Every structure is written in C-alpha cells, then in structure tokens.
Amino acid sequence: RGDGLRYRRVLLKLSGEALLGDKSFGIDHGVLGQYAADVKEAVDAGAEVALVIGGGNIFRGVSPQGSKMSSRAHADYMGMLATMINGMALQDALEGVGLDTRLVSAIDMNEIAEPFIRRRAIRHLEKGRVVVFGAGTGHPYFSTDTAAALRAAEVDAQVILKGTRVDGVFTADPETDASAQRYETIYGAEVIQRDLKVMDLTAVTLAKESGLPILVFNMNRPGTFARVLRGEPVGTTVHW
Ligand code: UDP
C-alpha cells in the first residue's frame, strides 16, 4: 500500500477557522464534507493520516473573548474544549465517507474520545484508521500548531502538512499584495528570521528539533491534499 506516495504517514493540521467556510460562527458542513472527501482520497491511495484540529472558530485563549477570562490558563482550557467539538464534527464527516476513525483527546473525556497512548495511536494508523487528535497538547499556553508538531514527532510522521486557505508561504501576504510570490521550498532559518507566518515559534522549534519538514498548502482546493502526498509541486516545503 502507498506505492507512488512521496509521504506515507502524515500529520495534517487544520485550523478551526477554516471550518467556518463563509459563516461567521460555527461549522460549515460543506467545508467538512470537502475535507472528508480529500482525506478519503489520500487513505484510499495508501496514506496513513493523523489530524490535529484547531478551535479558533469557536474559542481562542488569546483573543478579546479569552482575555476577559480570569486567567489565560482558564481561557486556554476553553479553547482546548473547542477543538474537541470540531474533532467530533470532523470524525462524523470522515465516517460519513466510509473511513474508520478514532478521536483521541489530550484531556480525559472517555465517553467521547480515547486517551492519547502513543503506541495505540500508531497502531490505529497502521490499520488504516484516521486518527483525529483533539484538545491540543492538553496544556494551556500552547497552540494547536504546537500540538501538530508534537503529535507528528510522536507518531513518526514524515511531514507536518499545514492545510490553509492560501497556496503556500509567500514573500508577502497574498491576500493583500498582488506582487507576492510563493516559495516552493524555504529554509526554516529564513522563516524564523523573516518572521514568516508558517506556525508559531514553539511549533516551528519543535519541528526543527525533530527534523520534520512543514509543508504549507491550500486545503480549500479539492484534491490538493492527495497531490501533496504524491509529491506534486504544490505548496511550500519548509525544511531544515
Ligand atoms: N490551546 C491550548 N493548548 C493547546 C492547544 C490549544 O491552550 O495545546 C487553546 C488555546 O487557547 C488556543 C485554542 O485552544 O487559542 C484554540 O486553538 P488554536 O487557536 O490553535 O486553533 P486554530 O487557530 O488552529 O483554529
């Protein structure tokens, strides 16, 4: 299985905000359905897919809402619970297209998700199950980007795939600057030095220490996820 794939075991990070689609709050089921179909295409091609989902569409610790809480930690725990709501929605969409899934939470909530046990998570992947990691790292003061780098390292993923709404990393913000150029590859040191917004610094540092490349691509273009796995020249690869 997985012949012809450039990347066989991958960690896909999806932001909570992406689940908004055109809505201002909550979850757009059209977006969920497209993501599920794209993951199915990859699994059918033989890829082992683990997912980390954010929570920004529902609640963020570092946000105007979050800052009104009595403590950052309290707000961050609310943010982690938000990722579990997205994780359950994503799990439902993935099962809807016929995939086997497991939702794994970094905070114990055994009625709805498994606890994170590294060897067990790897076993699920080996059996072709899509593993959705929720509740971030389980710790406040971190982000789901950092959870993505952490889980990618733990399950021996070959790459962190950051699914975004832009085509990769650009010389400037492509949504506001028409002259912005996409990098095909870029060194992590340059990402850090030029403060290019790929993932937060904690996540980037962890990826670097684990020697994990980060590939940024447009998840909102149907079929792009599988193209990335086949090694087609889409997105931007950050390497070390
Ligand atoms: N969060 C946290 N620890 C983690 C992961 C997430 O405290 O390990 C909290 C944090 O408050 C964050 C929120 O969960 O703002 C939602 O995650 P994030 O903002 O990373 O989601 P995204 O931007 O990907 O939608």
Image: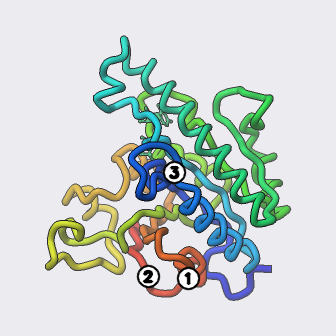
* Amino acid bearing label 3: Ala
Q: Is residue 209 visible?
A: no
Q: Residue furthest right?
A: 127
At 23% across and 70% down in the image, what residue appears?
174
Asked which secondary structure carries label 2, the reply is loop
Of labels 2 and 3, earlier in sequence is: 3
Q: Residues within 10 Å of mark 2 (few under 14, many from 20)?
A: many
Left/right placement of residue 178 relative to residue 12 reads left
Q: Position of residue 224 (x, y in %)?
A: 52, 78
Q: Up-down: is 78 above or below 168?
A: above
Q: Is residue 75 something one can see in this rendering? A: yes
Residue drawn at x 67%, y 50% is 132
Residue that mark 1 sits on: 227
Q: Given the image, on which type of amino acid does mark 1 rest?
A: Arg
Which residue type does callout 2 highlight?
Val
Residue 155, image x, y percentages: 67, 53
Q: Which quarter of the frame holds ligand 1?
A: top left
Q: Quadrant of the C terminus?
A: bottom left
Q: What residue do we see at 54% from left, 62% from top?
A: 31
- The reply, left or right, for residue 76 in relation to residue 91 is left
Q: Earlier in the sequence, mark 1 or mark 2?
A: 1
What is the quadrant of residue 110 in the picture?
A: top right
Q: Which residue is disc 3 drawn over?
A: 149
Q: Residue at x 71, y 41 (%)?
A: 104
Please say if 197 is above or below 142.
below
Q: Is there CB contact under 8 Å for labels 1 and 3?
A: no
